[in-house]
Image (spheres, helix red, strand yellow):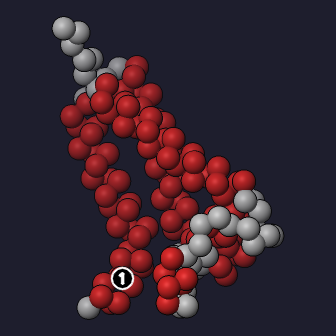
């Protein structure tokens, strides 16, 4: 039976996450912020008629990738922090995936540090959304 090389699973995870993030970025590049043709409507707004804290993120991301930051912040004031989360995660996934593929050294320490840093980044990036959800539910 062929034994897996250490770090193979971690490399595959980074590869998958890179693909997901590139899909998000591709979606942002593909859809024009100057047209209202986004295929994914806000379910919350469709049901309640009220915008949710994440309304406008797709539009804002399209503006950010085109360098129109001020306009993006008008669509969603939290868009830059969420976009930066995905951009930094993309860099981390590429670097850590390459590191794992090339050396595989310190794998345990890297995975623990990655999980910790990524969790903190996610909490910082999505805190306004989590807070809003908490206040809505309770």
Task: Estimate the x, y position of residue 93 in percent, counting from the top left.
Answer: 44, 40
| Residue lying at the far top of the rendered structure | 1
Visible residue check, residue 73: no
Visible residue check, residue 125: yes
Q: Residue at x 23, y 44 (%)?
A: 112
Q: Is residue 123 left or right of residue 54?
A: left
- Count numbered badges in the picture: 1
Task: Estimate the x, y position of residue 26 in percent, counting from the top left.
Answer: 65, 49
Q: Nearer the viewer, residue 86 or 56?
A: 56
In this picture, is 2 found above or below 31?
A: above
Mark 1: give few (<14), some (14-19) or many (20+) Cα within 10 Å.
Answer: few
Residue annotated with mark 1: 133
Q: Nearer the viewer, residue 60 or 31?
A: 31
Question: Split into 4 quadrants, where in the image is the N terminus?
Answer: top left
Task: Estimate the x, y position of residue 113 in percent, counting from the top left.
Answer: 27, 45
Question: Split into 4 quadrants, where in the image is the C terminus?
Answer: bottom left
In this picture, is 83 found above or below 137?
A: above
Which element type, helix, strand or loop, lies under badge 1?
helix
Task: Estimate the x, y position of residue 18 in percent, counting from the top left.
Answer: 49, 41
Q: Residue at x 36, y 77 (%)?
A: 130
């Amino acid at each position: 039976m062929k034994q897996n090389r250490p770090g193979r699973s971690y490399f595959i995870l980074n590869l998958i996450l890179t693909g997901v993030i590139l899909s998000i970025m591709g979606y942002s590049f593909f859809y024009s912020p100057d047209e209202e043709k986004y295929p994914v409507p806000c379910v919350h707004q469709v049901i309640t008629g009220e915008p949710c804290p994440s309304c406008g993120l797709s539009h804002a991301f399209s503006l950010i990738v085109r360098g129109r930051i001020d306009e993006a912040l008008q669509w969603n004031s939290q868009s830059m922090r969420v976009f930066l989360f995905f951009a930094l995660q993309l860099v981390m996934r590429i670097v850590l995936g390459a590191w794992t593929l090339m050396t595989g050294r310190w794998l345990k320490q890297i995975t623990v540090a990655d999980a910790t840093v990524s969790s903190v980044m996610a909490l910082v990036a999505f805190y306004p959304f989590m807070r809003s959800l908490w206040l809505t539910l309770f």
